[in-house]
Image (cartoon, helix red, strand yellow):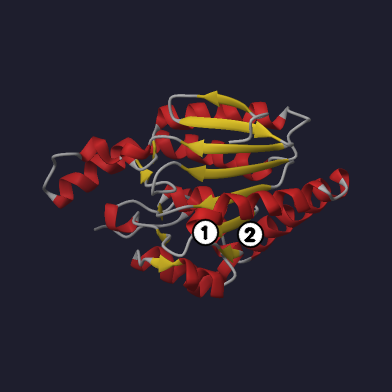
Amino acid sequence: MNPSSEVEVYENFAVERADRIATVTLNRPEKRNPINEAMLGEFETILARLRDDAETRVVILTGAGSSFCAGADLSVVAGVSDAAERQRIFAESRSRRIRLISRTFGMLEQLEQPTIAAVNGPAVGGGWGLALACDFQLAVPEARFWFPEVDLGVPLSMASTARLFAMVGTARAKRIILTCSRHSAEELEAWGMIHRIVAPGSLLGACRELAEQLIDKAPRALTTSKLHVNILAAVAAHEGGVYDPDVFIHRPR
């Protein structure tokens, strides 16, 4: 830790500010840094503060311990052995959480500051969605990525689907989402989804090096260019057939 840094500790996060870089750490390693309503509420508060902090030029997001983010907090189905019942309970608890995720991850994606995901371990479900909402993704070789939502009986959120589609296109997005397959950092680097694979002990250092490169750029040009890319990605997703799920016709099961 930088001796001149400022650190704020929350229930689910730690935020360190130093040298115009804010490092936001998901800080529940004993639970593999899960996503729940309390975590999302704190994250929204943190993002609002970073958005309004003129001294912060780049944001790094990482996880404490050996996981980046395990995705949804599955404590709601702890002890339920029947698969169908687990799916039912998980689906019922999802509706409010998915609205919070959409809003909070949208705030992350729309920050004026460039954002870097330092993926230090598994990024699962919403955890991978969290990384996709960042502008850059660096990962350790051991990191694994997957969306288990379909296996849990729910669809992947529209926001994460759109971000994934914008990155990899229709065929790979369907493969990733519908099969719930697990992917290595090496595989995703080959697909252009991981910008760099870094040894575990060097991950945050590599992210800070990238952050320093970005800080040296003209701020207004950097911010506007990020906005332009985000707009074009959203347009591409729309033109590629992303539709309102409320008008999708489901066959009876």
At which x and y percent is residue 250?
36, 57
On residue 139, the disc is 1
Q: What SS does tag 1 mark? A: strand
Q: Secondary structure at mark 2?
A: helix
Is any part of residue 244 visible from this angle? no
Residue 4 on image: x %, y %: 68, 29
Quadrant where the N terminus sits is top right
Q: Which residue is mark 2?
A: 238
The amino acid type found where label 1 is placed reads Ala
Q: Position of 70 compared to 2: left or right?
A: left
Q: Is residue 237 above or below residue 21?
A: below
Q: Is residue 5 visible?
A: yes
Classify 15 as above or below 184. Answer: above
User: Residue 238: horizontal and vertical position, in percent?
Assistant: 63, 59
Q: Amino acid at mark 2?
A: His
Q: Nearer the viewer, residue 201 or 244?
A: 201
Q: Residue at x 56, y 43 (%)?
A: 61
